[in-house]
Image (cartoon, rainbow, N blue to C red):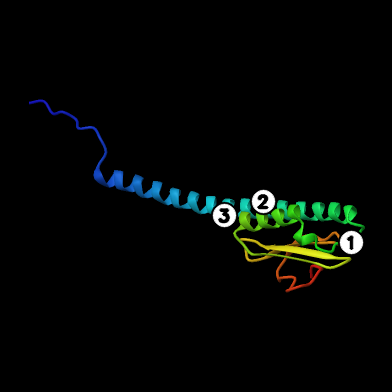
């Protein structure tokens, strides 16, 4: 009688391979979530930088004052876009000679821009009605 060789994988080998694939998939998904959050923050920062540029245009076109810059349709749209991108809260305040706008990032930090030219990440909010970043 002739013996035939059985070819194939055992159940244990298949389970080990499936477990390894599962571990690798979990690592990749965790990295993707970090990248997604980074992308949201980058989009919010870009919108806030555009707020600073639009506010300067507003200043030049309105007798060199920032009064009501946050109510300007273009500025308000950019501030809203920043909040939508990051999923965080926004705040924009203006006075006659100064303004400041900020958005909460996915990390819990704040990205703030103001009339002094500052644009950066801060650990704390600028505060209620302040027109300058901390």
Relative vertical location of residue 93 with respect to residue 34 in this rendering, above or below: below
Give the class, few, some or many, for how many residues have Cα within 10 Å of label 2's Cα (few <14, many ≥20).
some
Residue 43: mark: 2
| Local secondary structure at mark 1 | loop
Give the class, few, some or many, for how many residues have Cα within 10 Å of label 1's Cα (few <14, many ≥20).
some
Q: On the rendered structure, is 83 left or right of 11?
A: right
Residue at the spot x=79%, y=72% of the render?
130
Q: CA distance from mark 3 to mark 1?
A: 41 Å
Residue at the spot x=70%, y=69% of the render?
123
| Local secondary structure at mark 3 | helix
Question: Residue furthest toward the bottom?
Answer: 128
**Residue 114: in sight, yes or no?**
yes
Quadrant of the rendered image containing residue 87: bottom right
- The residue carrying mark 1 is 65
Q: Quadrant of the N terminus?
A: top left
Residue at the spot x=80%, y=60% of the render?
69
Labels 2 and 3 touching (C-beta < 8 A): no
Who is closer to the viewer here, 22 or 81? Answer: 81
Q: CA distance from mark 2 to mark 3?
A: 14 Å
Residue 85 in percent (x, y) is at: 62, 54
Q: On the rendered structure, is 13 left or right of 130?
A: left
- Which callout, 1 or 2, points at the residue further toward the start of the chain? 2
- Which callout, 2 or 3, points at the residue further toward the start of the chain? 3
- The residue carrying mark 3 is 34
């Amino acid at each position: 009688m002739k013996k035939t060789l059985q070819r194939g994988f055992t159940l244990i080998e298949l389970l080990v391979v499936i477990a390894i694939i599962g571990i690798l998939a979990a690592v990749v998904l965790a990295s993707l979530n970090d990248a997604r959050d980074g992308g949201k923050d980058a989009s919010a920062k870009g919108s806030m930088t555009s707020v600073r540029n639009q506010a300067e245009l507003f200043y030049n076109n309105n007798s060199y004052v920032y009064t009501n810059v946050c109510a300007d349709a273009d500025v308000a749209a950019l501030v809203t876009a920043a909040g939508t991108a990051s999923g965080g809260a926004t705040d924009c305040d203006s006075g006659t000679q100064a303004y400041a706008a900020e958005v909460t990032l996915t990390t819990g930090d704040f990205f703030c821009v103001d009339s002094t030219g500052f644009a950066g990440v801060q650990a704390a909010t600028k505060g209620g009605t302040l027109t300058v970043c901390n």
